[in-house]
Amino acid sequence: MMNKIFAFSALICALFLSSGTILAQQLLTIDDAIGLGLENNYGIQLSKNLTEIAENNHSFGNAGFFPSINLTSSRSERVEDSEFQAGGEARSTSGARSSSTSAAINLDWTLFDGMQMFNTYDRLGVLSDVTNQELRFDMEALVAQISLSYYNIIRISEQLKILANNIEVSQERIEIEETKLDLGSGSQYDLLQARSDLNADRAAYIRETNQLTEAKIVLNELLSRDPNIDFEVTSEININRGLVHDELYQKLVNENTELTIARLQKDISRLEIREIRGERFPEISLNSGYSFNRSQNDGGFIRFNETTGFSIGLTARVNIFDGFNLNRRVQNAQINQKNAEISYEMQKLRLESDFAAIYRFYENSIELVDLERDNFENAQETLEIALERFRLGTISSLEFREAQRTFLEAENRLINVLFDAKVAETNLLQLSGDLGLLLAGQ
């Protein structure tokens, strides 16, 4: 009988809690969820756009390597009345037209600026690397969030099955109490108590159903899709028991995304110092151009004038004194470099502390999984024995309810500790910066 009882799914209980309409729901695997999240999540899309902007900024033109070429032209016309006298001769004109036309093309090219353009180009490249690492960090965080949200749904779904099975056991208890009452060996009190316990079990199921709905809404939000979309998940939480402390720690030091970003920030601060120091050197620019000018004046002595010509030259600029502002900027940049180094060490210590605590929690969770599995098997066997004895009338209704409660708690503890172990595993893999292993370990 107990095998039959534990074979019932939560769907049996839902038959009397709902309208009775059963709709086929889409099965969403963890791989599908992660794929949808990485493709559709709005935060990831924003991060990708920022990465594209940084890649566009990493160019020779933005760093100042290329010359600037400007083309200018103008045309103007005037109509004037003029009157003048020179050497006793007077002359006047009325409605004289004049025009002026000019065009020029100019080139300005910085040939030397104290290596600032090279340092700027390198800094833009590091900034591009930073945005790529930030995108990776956001993707890792999203994968971890989706994984934990997904396994939380499995945890709640399994708890629903437990509650559904518990309802079936409570219904079996009522049937036994009714039979005893009919035979004259039972009591109305025990029957009423059994019915009250059944209602409590049903209320617990409804509350857990609400939690399941909320958990699915959270996952749909992470996947950037309609929160009303319903789906089913797989039914198992598989724990990776093969995570090795030393291997994960080395990956933490070498591949953790936050530490990588902190190292890149140190490179940026170093390049900023070199950029500012480059301003101490002369700046040499090449200036070249070609111009055309033409003017025509019907009322002047010179009726027509046209010039064309090519020009080329070098311009040198040296900052001799700027109120010690350059020294101040160098000093501030050096302080920023020290802050970047301190920030790196601070993040490294924080991550190492998190790693030590989480890995210990992971080991303890593995031990608890084995322990709670044994407890669950013992509680299941105890409940089977209690049910048989309750049918025979050798134990009271209260004793049977206690065995039922013990089994329910044991099964809940097993599911919760499996989820806790998965949380620890996911956090360890995220700290190690191994996104591929995080995906493969699902």
Image (cartoon, grey):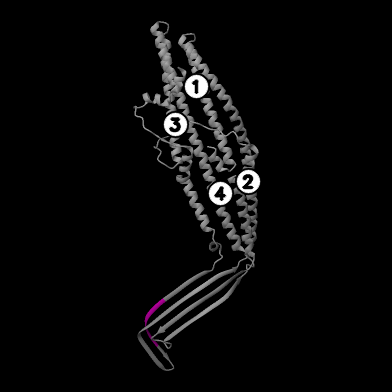
Disc 1 to disc 3, how far (Cα)? 18 Å
Front label number (2 vs 3) = 2
Secondary structure found at label 2: helix
Amino acid type shown at disc 4: Gln
- Asked whether the viewer can see residue 323, the reply is no
The label shown at residue 133 is 4
Amino acid type shown at disc 1: Leu
Disc 2 to disc 1, how far (Cα)? 45 Å
Q: Residue furthest bottom?
A: 88
Q: Quadrant of the N terminus?
A: top left
Secondary structure found at label 4: helix
Secondary structure found at label 1: helix
Q: Residue at horizontal 54%, vertical 68%?
A: 67
Amino acid type shown at disc 2: Asn
Upstream in sequence: badge 1 or badge 3: 3
- In reply to whether residue 76 is colored magenta, the answer given is yes
Disc 1 to disc 4, how far (Cα)? 46 Å
Magenta residues, start to end? 75-83
Q: Position of residue 411 (x, y in %)?
A: 51, 24
The label shown at residue 408 is 1
- In reply to whether residue 127 is colored magenta, the answer given is no
